[in-house]
Amino acid sequence: MNSERHIMSAFDRDLEGVQALVVKMGGMVETAIHDSAIALETRDEELAEDVRRRDKAIDELELKINEEAARLIALRAPRATDLRTALTVIKISAILERVGDYAKNIAKRSHVLVHMPAVESSGMALRRMSLTVEGMMKDALDAYIQRDAALAADVRKRDLEVDQMYNALFREFLTYMMEDPRNITACMHLHFIAKNIERMGDHATGIAEQVIYLATGELPEDARPKSDSVTRATLNEGED
C-alpha cells in the first residue's frame, strides 16, 4: 500500500509538472498574440521580428511537453482520469503551438505591410478582433487551470463574434480593392492576417472543448456556433 501511494504521489508530481509547462506555454502564446497585433497596428518591425524569433521557444516547449506526457503514460500506467489529463495536455500543447505559428505569420506579413500605404481603419479593426481572441485564449487557459467547464463553454460561444468580425473585414477589404486596384496587394496581406486571427479564435475554442472534456469526461455534443462565411468555400484556411 505504501509503495502504491508512493508511485501515485510521484505520478501526481510529474503530471503537475507537465501541466505547469502547458500553462507556461499558454502564457508565451498569449504574449505572441498580443505582440503580433501591436506590431501590426504600430508598424513596429523590431517587435514583429521578436515575435518571429520567440516562436522557436514555443515549438521547443511543445516537444518537451509531448515527451514528458508520453513518458508519464508509458511508465506510470495512469488510471482513466489521469490518462485523460495526460492526453489533454498533449492536445492542448499542439493547439498552442499552432496558435504560435499564426502569430508568427502575422509578424511576417507586418514586415511587408510596413513598406505599403496604410489601408484606412484596418489596423484598428484587426486590433479589436485580436483583442477578442486574446481574451478568449486567456479565458480558455484559465478554464483549464481551474477545470471550469462553464467558462470554457462561454469561450466557445464567443467564437461566433470573431467569425462575424472576420466576415465584415473580408467584405471591407473587397470594397477597398474594387475601389482602387492599388490597394489589392495590401488588402490581400491584411485578409490573410484576419484569417490567421480567426483561426486563432477557432483554436482557443478547441482548447475550451478540451477543458470541457477534461472536466466532464465528454466533448460538447452540440456543434460550435459558426457565422455563415462568404469566404469558406472560396479561400483557404490560412498558412503553415
Image (spheres, rainbow, N blue to C red):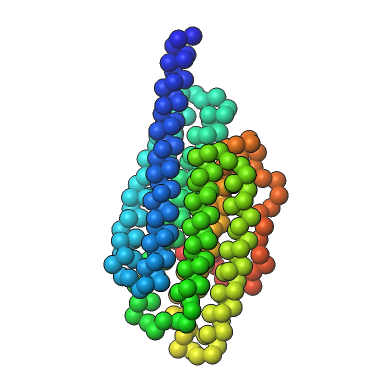
What residue lies at 37% left-to-right and 45% top-to-bottom?
61
Taking the view exactly as shown, the residue that stands out farthest to the left is 46
Spot occupied by residue 232 in the image (x, y as percentages of width and height): 61, 68
Classify 85 as above or below 180.
Answer: above
**Looking at the rendering, which quadrant does residue 22 occupy?**
top left
Would residue 109 be seen by someone viewing this image from the given angle? no
Identify whether 201 is placed above or below 66. Answer: below
Q: Position of residue 215 (x, y in %)?
A: 60, 37
Q: In the drawing, does residue 28 fall left or right of residue 203?
A: left
Residue 169, horizontal then vertical, whole percent: 56, 74
Q: Residue at x 44, y 20 (%)?
A: 9
Please tell me which residue lies in front, 62 or 6: 6
Residue at the far bottom in the pictured view: 180
Compared to residue 138, the image places residue 87 above or below, namely above
Which residue is depicted at the point 44% across and 80% down? 186
Question: Does 126 appear above or below 58?
Answer: below
